[in-house]
Amino acid sequence: MEIAGVRVARATRVRHAIELIELADGTRISLPTCFVNGASAGPRLYLGAAIHGDEVNGVAIVARVLQKLDPSHLAGSIVAMLVQNPLALHADHRLALSHYLKSPLDQAPNDAWSCFPGRPDGSLAEKLAHILFGLIRACDYAIDLHTPTRGGRYVPITILPDPALGEPFQRAEKLGEAFGSGYIVKTTTGMYVRDGILAVEATRAGVPAFTFEIGEGGRLEPDMVAIGVRCVENALKHLGMVRGEPDPPERVVRIREFVGLRATRGGLLFTDAPLGAPVRRGEVLARITSVYGDELELLTSPADGVFVRSTTLSTVASGERAVTIGLVE
Ligand SMILES: [Zn+2]
């Protein structure tokens, strides 16, 4: 196959660097890439990690999948963007912080994840989205791996694009089901289904895609990486790219909507409910105390659901999100 000007022979892999920008001292920043061409024909899968630079579990997941994979046993091909946002990874931050701090106005918009399909002459985030979108459009399916940004933790959760996207959405849903993370979100509201989001724009362009969130921002977690590797391998099996049947999770929680609970008081945040647990309406999920130890607020579940995302920061100010539950189908 030939992609991004690189020829990849049958049953081989090539590591490559795709140029992004030049910094003031002449340093060239590029995107670490791995192209894998299988031994026989099949779909082409895009795997992208760390479009938010502190979301490193995805980097380790994609790296491990590639290490385990024998190209001579692969049908089709893989375009793996191990670090979709290298300047953000350098900062160990959601955004390319050096650019953002230096010229926040010029660099707006600054979150590449929500800038798709991007612009070749735009801000760094828009330019990055443009380059990534060119690669995504050369693929048949795409998976975008995330964790929450630093200070948050998700259960392993597959978040589908907007169901209004028709036939490509249906294929994204089938792929997401086979992916088997144990939690799957099919919703028409919230940021994950908005215009501009990577998986939404990919699916709109005819490349079925979804967002996968797992674990905690700013941390590398071997147990979460192992789950993610199993899920990506399930996707490869579902697409007929490697042999075998997908390994399903023990149970599947189907979520129709996220509900975030924001603190109305500021203080220390104590989270009582275990992540992933079913919760009942009125159940206490977290508590906020003053720095003197006085209890200021109890955060209770507004409905029956599942506790899917916790805040791992030790403090909250009034207005900050402390807990997210998923309303179950
Ligand atoms: Zn993210």
Image (cartoon, rainbow, N blue to C red):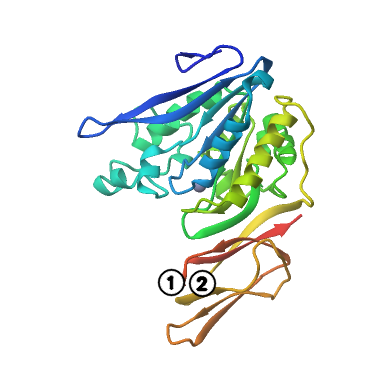
Q: Check residue 263 in the rendering and tell me which mark sits there, or answer none.
A: 2
Q: Residue at x 36, y 40 (%)?
A: 87
Label 1 element class: loop
In the image, residue 263 sits, relative to residue 43, either above or below, namely below
Q: Hey, what amino acid is under mark 2?
A: Ala
Residue 162 quadrant: top right
On the rendered image, what quadrant is the N terminus found in?
top right
Label 2 element class: loop
Where residue 20 appears, as percent x and y from the top left, is 36, 29
Q: Residue at x 65, y 34 (%)?
A: 165
Crowding at mark 2 (Cα within 10 Å: few <14, some 14-19, many 20+): many
Where residue 169 appears, as percent x and y from the top left, is 68, 34
In the image, residue 264 sits, relative to residue 145, either above or below, namely below
CB at disc 2 and ligand 1 closer than 8 Å = no
| Residue linked to disc 1 | 317
Where residue 131 appears, as percent x and y from the top left, is 43, 27
In the image, residue 224 sits, relative to residue 282, either above or below, namely above
- Mark 1 in CB contact with mark 2 (< 8 angstroms): yes
CB at disc 1 and ligand 1 closer than 8 Å = no
- Considering only order in the chain, which callout, 2 or 1, is on the residue closer to the N terminus? 2
Where residue 202 appears, as percent x and y from the top left, is 57, 31
**Front residue of 238 and 172:** 238
**Front residue of 252 and 202:** 252
Q: Residue at x 56, y 58 (%)?
A: 153
Asked whether residue 139 appears in the rendered view, the answer is yes
**Front residue of 119 and 12:** 12
**Front residue of 163 and 298:** 298
On the rendered image, what quadrant is the C terminus found in?
bottom right
Q: Residue at x 57, y 40 (%)?
A: 61
CA gap, disc 1 and disc 2: 7 Å
Q: Hey, what amino acid is under mark 1?
A: Ala
